[in-house]
Amino acid sequence: DAKTTQPPSMDCAEGRAANLPCNHSTISGNEYVYWYRQIHSQGPQYIIHGLKNNETNEMASLIITEDRKSSTLILPHATLRDTAVYYCIIRVTGANNLFFGTGTRLTVIP
Amino acid sequence: GAVVSQHPSRVICKSGTSVKIECRSLDFQATTMFWYRQFPKQSLMLMATSNEGSKATYEQGVEKDKFLINHASLTLSTLTVTSAHPEDSSFYICSARASGQGSQRELFFGEGSRLTVL
């Protein structure tokens, strides 16, 4: 699986958009970009995933660069409950398991 | 959405005893479940892949005799930490993907089980 690089931590003001970057310069054509988050002492929660097109759901938007070497997760209006560790994961088509990197610890500040 | 449940959520045991953690898929069948371990302030590390009706596949460095995995049905996998020691204290998390779903559906994770060995 391709490696990912994320900043270890970020702060975001409550109500503002949180933009979490992820570099995956070695991604292959059949690998998807997945985002999960983990709130303290809970299991990871699925957020969104994409291949090459930008994606949006009720939780977030995923922007993938044209060369697919990086992506950004956007939480449009961060709340205090969005404070968590966010993991960007590259997953091969058909693979069942996920390998987690170190993630970004997002702290939403009142 | 699909739910994966773990039990117990917290367990404290004495050194040398064995502890069993259950992972259930509540509204779907899972031929494959995964067990992760997470130490404080670290990321999740895959321990093993649990396959219904067959032996589990362990990641390098994980002792199969120490961490016994049983996947006896399509909705239940168990992890038994045998002869637990303080260094086994950790947050154990399972995940599952429903059988027959498209290859890019998300994996569902349990709430995690925090083991403390005294």
Image (tube, helix red, strand yellow):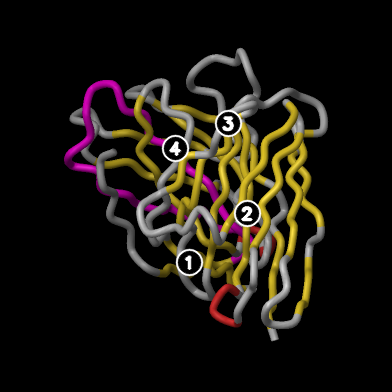
Q: Nearer the viewer, mark 4 or mark 3?
A: 3
The residue tagged 4 is: A34
Q: CA distance from mark 2 to mark 3?
A: 16 Å
The residue tagged 3 is: B51
Q: Circle 1 marks a residue in which chain? A: A
Vertical comparison of B33 with A14: above or below = above
Q: Residue at x 55, y 46 (%)?
A: A76
Residue A7, how many percent across, how many down? 33, 63
Q: Residue at x 74, y 40 (%)?
A: B4
Q: Residue at x 64, y 73 (%)?
A: B84
Label placed on residue B83: none
> In this rendering, does residue B1 appear at all?
no
- Left/right of residue B116 with respect to residue A86 in the rendered view: right
Same chain letter for marks 4 and 3: no
> In this rendering, does residue B42 appear at all?
yes
Q: Amino acid at mark 3?
A: Asn
The residue tagged 2 is: B93
Q: CA distance from mark 4 to mark 1?
A: 16 Å
Residue A86, how many percent across, how many down? 49, 55
The residue tagged 1 is: A105
Query: Is B90 within the magenta?
Result: no
Residue A21, how many percent across, how many down? 34, 51
Residue A98, how many percent across, how many down? 45, 41
Q: CA distance from mark 3 to mark 1?
A: 33 Å
Same chain letter for marks 1 and 2: no
Magenta-highlighted residues: A14-39
Q: Amino acid at mark 4?
A: Tyr
SS state under label 2: strand
Q: Circle 4 marks a residue in which chain? A: A
SS state under label 1: strand
Q: Nearer the viewer, mark 2 or mark 3?
A: 3
